[in-house]
Amino acid sequence: MPRLIRLDTGDAIGEIDETQLKFLIDQLEEEHDDDKDYFIDRDTLELLSDNGADPDLLAMLEKGLAGDDDMTVAWE
């Protein structure tokens, strides 16, 4: 099962299922084909919500922000 990592701290944000991962890949910009990291801020969370993100995924990302304005996450 894929898991999300916050790159600046190395903290695990949580595990996501394949459907949630596909949603993130489809919604967020990748710089190249092998790109596995994504910039997340409050506007990104709003965009994901507006586009039908799973509530559990949104809650996980919100918790991962931990009060910060933004973060970069990767999946492995």
Image: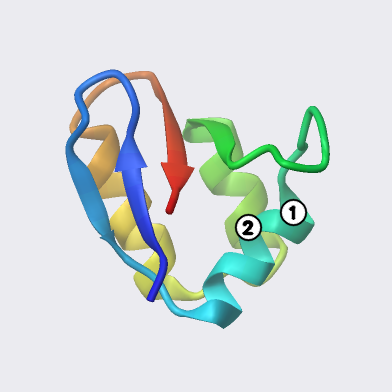
Q: Is residue 25 left or right of residue 3?
A: right
Residue depicted at 74% across the width and 53% down the height: 27
Are the residues tagged 2 and 1 within 8 Å (C-beta)? yes
| Marks 2 and 1, how far apart at CA | 5 Å
Q: Which mark is residue 24?
A: 2
Question: Is disc 2 surrounded by few (<14), some (14 to 19) or many (20+) residues within 10 Å?
Answer: some
- Give the camera-side residue of 38 and 52: 38
Residue 62 image position (x, y, % from top left)? 32, 47
Q: Is residue 7 left or right of residue 42?
A: left
Vertical position of residue 21 compared to residue 13: above or below: below
Residue 7 image position (x, y, % from top left)? 34, 27
Residue 55 image-quadrant placement: bottom left
Question: Is disc 1 surrounded by few (<14), some (14 to 19) or many (20+) residues within 10 Å?
Answer: some
Three-letter amino acid code of the residue under disc 1: Gln
Residue depicted at 21% across the width and 30% down the height: 10
Residue 1 image position (x, y, % from top left)? 38, 76
Q: Residue furthest front?
A: 34
Residue 61 image position (x, y, % from top left)? 36, 49
Residue 39 image-quadrant placement: top right
- Give the camera-side residue of 47 and 23: 23
Which residue was labeled with disc 1? 27
Three-letter amino acid code of the residue under disc 2: Leu
Residue depicted at 67% across the width and 69% down the height: 22
Q: Is residue 15 left or right of residue 41?
A: left
Vertical position of residue 25 compared to residue 11: above or below: below
- Give the camera-side residue of 43 and 18: 18
Q: How many marks?
A: 2
Vertical position of residue 69 compared to residue 26: above or below: above
Label 2 residue SS: helix
Q: Which mark is residue 44?
A: none
Label 1 residue SS: helix
